[in-house]
Amino acid sequence: MFRQQAPICLSQENHLRLILAYFKAIVATKNVFVSNECFNKDTVIENDDVKKRRAELAEELVGLHPNLNG
């Protein structure tokens, strides 16, 4: 079921980025989509690629923080 919904989420996200750009919003360029297969039975992320992408997104968000204060 998740795989059927993923393209819809991606499409909505792309449209939202265009709207946010129009309003000159500060938006992170990276995304991390995680499927159910990436989690273990204790709901901990096991996939090393997802962990790496999540860390990169966190670094980008921390880097964007100074831009929020003007």
Image (cartoon, helix red, strand yellow):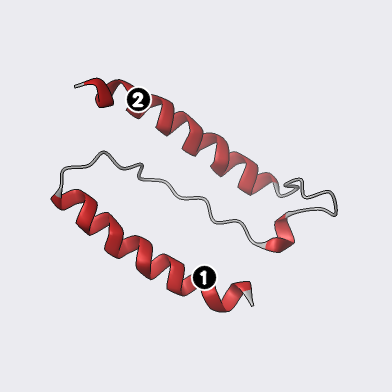
Q: Earlier in the sequence, mark 2 or mark 1?
A: 1
- Decide which of 52, 38 is in the foreground and name it: 38
Q: Circle 1: is it few (<14), some (14-19), or many (20+) Cα within 10 Å?
A: some
- Give the labeled residue for mark 1: 6
- Tell me if 28 is positioned left or right of 21 in this view: right
On screen, residue 27 above or below 63: below
Image quarter in which the N terminus is found: bottom right
Question: Residue 59's spot in the image, x, y percent?
Answer: 47, 29
**Residue drawn at point x = 64 percent, y = 41 percent:** 51
Q: Which structural element holds mark 2?
A: helix
Question: Residue 20's spot in the image, x, y percent?
Answer: 23, 51
- Give the labeled residue for mark 2: 65
Q: Circle 2: is it few (<14), some (14-19), or many (20+) Cα within 10 Å?
A: few
- Residue type (three-letter) at the residue carrying disc 2: His
Q: Within the image, what quadrant is residue 2 found in? A: bottom right
**Residue drawn at point x = 56 percent, y = 41 percent:** 54
- Tell me if 23 is positioned left or right of 1 in this view: left
**Residue drawn at point x = 42 percent, y = 66 percent:** 10
Q: Which structural element holds mark 1?
A: helix
Q: CA distance from mark 2 to mark 1?
A: 28 Å
Question: Residue 27's spot in the image, x, y percent?
Answer: 31, 42
- Residue type (three-letter) at the residue carrying disc 1: Ala
